[in-house]
Amino acid sequence: MGTMAFDAIETPFAKTDKIIGGSATYVAYAASNFVQPVQQISIVGNDFPLEELQALEQRGVKTEGVEIIPDKKSFFWSGRYHLDMNSRDTLVTDLNVLADFNPNVPESYQGCEFLMLGNLVPAIQQKIITQFKERPKLIVMDTMNFWIETAWEDLKKVITMVDVLLVNDSEARQITGEYSLVKAAKKILTMGPKFLIVKKGEHGALLFHADNVFVAPAMPLDEVFDPTGAGDTFAGGFIGHLAKTKDISFENMKTAIIVGSAMASFCVEKFGPQRLKEITKEDIAARIQEFVQLVNFDIALV
Amino acid sequence: MGTMAFDAIETPFAKTDKIIGGSATYVAYAASNFVQPVQQISIVGNDFPLEELQALEQRGVKTEGVEIIPDKKSFFWSGRYHLDMNSRDTLVTDLNVLADFNPNVPESYQGCEFLMLGNLVPAIQQKIITQFKERPKLIVMDTMNFWIETAWEDLKKVITMVDVLLVNDSEARQITGEYSLVKAAKKILTMGPKFLIVKKGEHGALLFHADNVFVAPAMPLDEVFDPTGAGDTFAGGFIGHLAKTKDISFENMKTAIIVGSAMASFCVEKFGPQRLKEITKEDIAARIQEFVQLVNFDIALV
């Protein structure tokens, strides 16, 4: 569940007109490599290209839960990245259809085992959870600084209802008031989630669970062409791997984080979800092997 | 080879009067856990406590190459760390004895196989190298932004003479004008060194060699008490492991980086080299095992 939208993106090196974006788009493109069907919940306007929905359908992404509003436009976001490709300025946010988003889980989606809540109004994330007659086996939730600042009470409530919280480093600090990510993680793990993933962009990601920590690097790349959607793609690879293996142990989540990191490393190579549309299972397997090489060392040499 | 000095340190949480510091001090404390003798080259004034030199001697650190100037004071640095513990302001730099430092490699040091050039005037680093009748098997060199800005021609020359260059991420960018660390590394590897280590503080370190990359995380810590000397301690652990194993392959350098990272993670736990004086071989072995846990994942689960 998340947004399907248009983005216009400026980086220090290039610029696009409106292209397809949205958290649910990236999650679906990433996750559908590992598990099918993916059951999408989102909302679009009359300007959203039908062939984009069809392209997703062909990858095993169900779109029954994607509401199409005939007399409105799709959510539109425009932003400009700074030279570090980590920070950005928002230029335009046109909510359009998103202003009235009040999703209903289709009957055919009942029984879903792995629920990914993309970044959205916390009250809507909560509504989705409660619409499942049987609680999904694993609920993963993304959020952002905007909701921490404007809807903290609602957000705090949803956080108690999920298994895995996904935030970036500054959001983990903002939620807890702790500068140390280890201390921040300890606090967040008392707020509901059993697992916390802290995304650090080019510096990788951390997974916290009880007293365990796992660190995954980001793939060092010649060039980050467009970071838009990298976090959502990471989330899609992460939950896609878990859904494929049906194993929600800490050990398997470590591997899921590597899979998510590999997917994110593709995402940033081109504008929007373009690169995710091109890559094959072989590309993905090769990239995951590169991650093994990247972090592997021989402890016997110590 | 490097400085032995006094530091006065302020962090957001605590403050010291003058304590022992200097790059060569940290390197020696770290390296002497893995290889003895360590042959120190440095310079101190009449205010440097003899018991500090004795404490190093007891750890197998030879101090014949540490010149003691009877009528001058030791190098003194004072700085204040910002809240992120990564950036800092220099409050005082009293060169004192360092202004006249013109080291001579003692005869008894000839035949040295592993040379660590701590951060210092590039011309002095070069002088040390040329004083060895037989080139050491491996020369590792640290430097900093100050020399990039004020002694670039000299620095460029020394860089051609070493095997491993050790810089932080902003220095790698400054040397090459490349924002991407991968592109920066490719350029630096054409300037002389066969290996480049990019230190990223709390985000770990990268090792580049030909087309190979290795990423090591930093240990996520509850608290970084004092980051002073962490980079030098990393260097000491790194070259200490290489000197112990006498294996300068890329594979073994990966392990050396983990050893260096483990040593650095101790260094930041207390002010100055205090924690490095306390730890045992068992502490070090346990910390290295924690690193294995931190990055290890089961590829068979993919």
Image (cartoon, coloured by chain):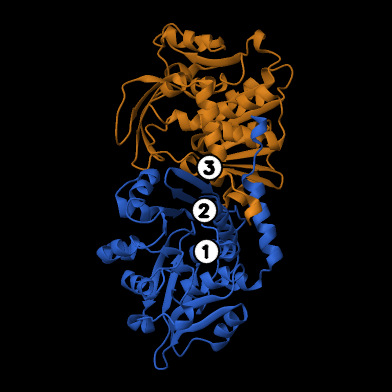
Chain colours: A orange, B blue
Q: Chain of mark 2?
A: B
Q: Residue at x 33, y 48 (%)?
A: B187
For the residue labelled by badge 2, is the local secondary structure a helix, a strand or a loop? loop
Q: Is residue B237 above or below residue A259?
A: below
In the rendering, at what x and y percent does residue B163 appear? 41, 59
Looking at the image, which residue sits at the far left? B153
Mark 1 → mark 3, Cα distance in angstroms: 21 Å
Mark 1 → mark 2, Cα distance in angstroms: 13 Å
- List the residue tagged with mark 3: A294
Q: Nearer the viewer, residue A38 or B41?
A: B41
Numbered label attached to residue A77:
none
Numbered label attached to residue B239:
1
Q: Is residue B6 above or below residue A19?
A: below
Check disc 2 and give the amino acid type.
Ser
Q: Chain of mark 1?
A: B
Quadrant the C terminus of chain B occupies: top right
In the rendering, at what x and y percent does residue B44 appear? 44, 84
Mark 2 → mark 3, Cα distance in angstroms: 16 Å
Looking at the image, which residue sits at the far front? B134
**How busy is the neighbourhood of tag 2: few (under 14 within 10 Å), some, or many (20 plus)?**
few
